[in-house]
Image (cartoon, rainbow, N blue to C red):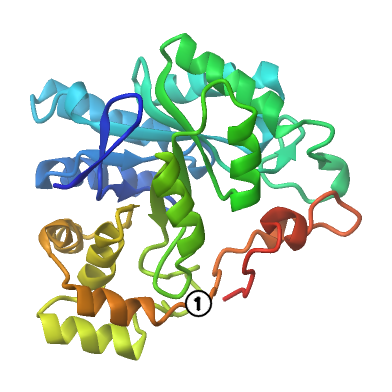
Amino acid sequence: MPALPFRHGGAMPALGLGTWRLAPEQTAATVCTALELGYRHIDAAAIYGNEAQIGEALRQAFRDGLVRREELWITGKLWNDCHEPQEVRPALERSLADLGLERLDLYLIHWPVAQRRGVAMASSPEEQYSLEQVPLAATWAAMEELVDRGLTGHIGVSNFSGAKLKALSAGARIRPEALQIERHPLLQQNDLLAWCRQQGVVVTGYGPLGSSGANRPPLVLEHPQVVALAAERGLTAAQLLLAWGIGCGTAVIPKSVQPARLAENLAAADAVLDGELLTRLTALDQGRRLIDGRFWCLEGGPYTLESLWNGEPVAGG
């Protein structure tokens, strides 16, 4: 399994199990199966509502001797209602209790959006804070203290524009070591990827198969050129997309509950794509963001698509 090294030590397996939209009743069995197959990277988040079930699976795996904690990479995320500095450490401690762990390998600010404590998804502007009221720099300083206290090995951000990531990095005592963004051939964000590579920021692409929801078709997975290129190489379309992401030097975190699909996805880590194929996939870039964050843009509220992405592509799916 390829791994992506961090500037302060440690390395994250390039293919992990995503747990977004993994129903709690399916989570423990799915994580156990993934670990049995050889997954060693689990991507979690408090807002997914399934950390306790992930913890159940981890405890079982440890008891059975299937894997040791030091062999795993566990990522967690700080939700929007815990951006106030005094809320950051308690939020991580709640996740650690649910996961049954003493520390995470990586902890991310989930979105550059702040909400009132206890609000999962803001439905009115009154439930949101502007970034002037709760600055990202203040949240980040509390994230740095988590590293100081040994509660997480590394810290980073998710769903940040390049401008926000650069501004945060410029004033940080511990610069962000990781960025998680939507990434697939229709949304490649190559300028941001190049900057991250130059700065030693590890990038994880979520939504690597290009599915934006249960009620929308998987625009990337069923793209005619993706299907044709996969057939040429004797791969499934999913394997091609995952191998492409890894070949670009990023990590990928696909989700599945089917054992056969979990095994198929994991095998993509061993697929090596030639330069010609990578070039043909690169030509598909449309700047097409399937998860554009418009659900944070409430009438009269502090967030707009322009303020979220600072001029980066927002061509919604």
Q: Is residue 22 visible?
A: no
Q: Which residue is mark 1?
A: 216
| Residue closer to the observer: 176 or 257 | 176
- Crowding at mark 1 (Cα within 10 Å: few <14, some 14-19, many 20+): few
| Residue closer to the observer: 264 or 31 | 264
Task: List x then y, in percent, for residue 40.
Answer: 20, 39
Quadrant, the C terminus: bottom right
Which residue type does callout 1 highlight?
Arg
Task: List x then y, in percent, for residue 152.
Answer: 41, 21
Q: What residue appears at the point 49 percent right and 44 percent down from the top-left corner?
A: 48
Q: Is 293 displayed left or right of 71 in the figure?
A: right
Q: What residue appears at the point 50 percent right and 77 percent down from the top-left corner?
A: 216
Q: Is 2 displayed left or right of 227 in the figure?
A: left
Q: Is residue 291 visible?
A: yes
Q: What residue appears at the point 22 percent right and 85 percent down from the top-left corner?
A: 229
Q: Is 201 displayed left or right of 72 in the figure?
A: right
Q: Which residue is at the far right?
A: 300
| Mark 1 element type | loop
Q: Is 57 displayed left or right of 111 in the figure?
A: left
Task: List x then y, in percent, for residue 145.
Answer: 55, 14
Task: List x then y, in percent, for residue 118.
Answer: 70, 32
